[in-house]
Amino acid sequence: MASTGNNIKTAAVAWTASQLAAAFWQFSLAFYPSRQPLLLRLQDEHQANINVLLGICWLSLQQRQLTSTQLRQILSALEPVNQQVTRPLRQIRRSLQADTLQFKHALLAVELQAEQAEQQAIAEVLAKCWYQLESLSSAHTALQAYCALCQTDLSSLPSLLVDLDQAIRGYTPGLGETLI
């Protein structure tokens, strides 16, 4: 059953991909804004996918983490929309001049739809493996496993991952926010 607030309960029913995607998106909208600089730095300097990072954070609130196989499945599911839609939109938006502010905002709205499509792809994988997710050892370990899988140089990341891990630990779900 779903819970709100700080009470995190294990799902007693099978969650659909759309239910998982809705809860994941709701979490992302609440968690991302105050962590934006950190997440963008991980994306821009280390090629991390923010939706995967947010997924790891969201799962850690449920005391769950992905196995390497599940993480590979998610990365594979994300690849088409990320390569063909999300990244090109981001590059175009960022390359626009300041005098095209209205167009930049329109592109950002489309880019957010692509980000939501990525989260739907993540949710579809999660819906298939929800009960096989491992118990969380630590969010930091899960974040390191993702970086290692992406062949990111971890030597420059420890402080960033610690910062993100602390942000997860300090996160309090908002009123009405659903945790699975």
Image: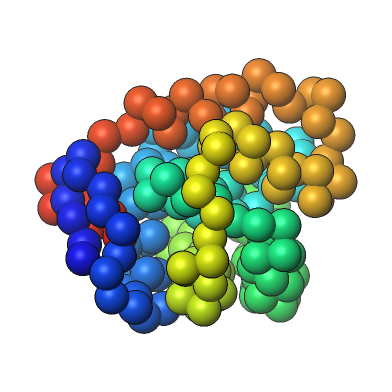
Q: Would you place residue 38 above or below residue 88 in this image?
A: above
Residue at 70% x, 37% y is 144
Q: Would you place residue 135 above or below residue 116 in this image?
A: above
Residue at 26% x, 53% y is 9
Q: Position of residue 33 (x, y in %)?
A: 39, 39
Instruction: Quarter of the image for the C terminus: give it.
Output: bottom left
Left or right: 83 with respect to 175?
right
Left or right: 147 with respect to 160?
right
> Residue 14 occupies which quadrant of the picture?
bottom left
Residue at 49% x, 37% y is 36
Left or right: 172 with respect to 97?
left
Q: Is residue 133 visible?
A: yes
**Which residue in the rendered view is the most extreme toward the top?**
159
Q: Position of residue 1 (x, y in %)?
A: 21, 65
Which of the two residues, 173 or 92, is positioned nearer the viewer here? 173
Judging from the image, the colouring scheme is rainbow
Q: How many marks?
A: 0
Q: Position of residue 89 (x, y in %)?
A: 63, 65
Q: Position of residue 19 (x, y in %)?
A: 32, 74
Residue at 55% x, 37% y is 137
Which of the two residues, 85 or 119, is positioned nearer the viewer here? 119
Q: Is residue 117 visible?
A: no
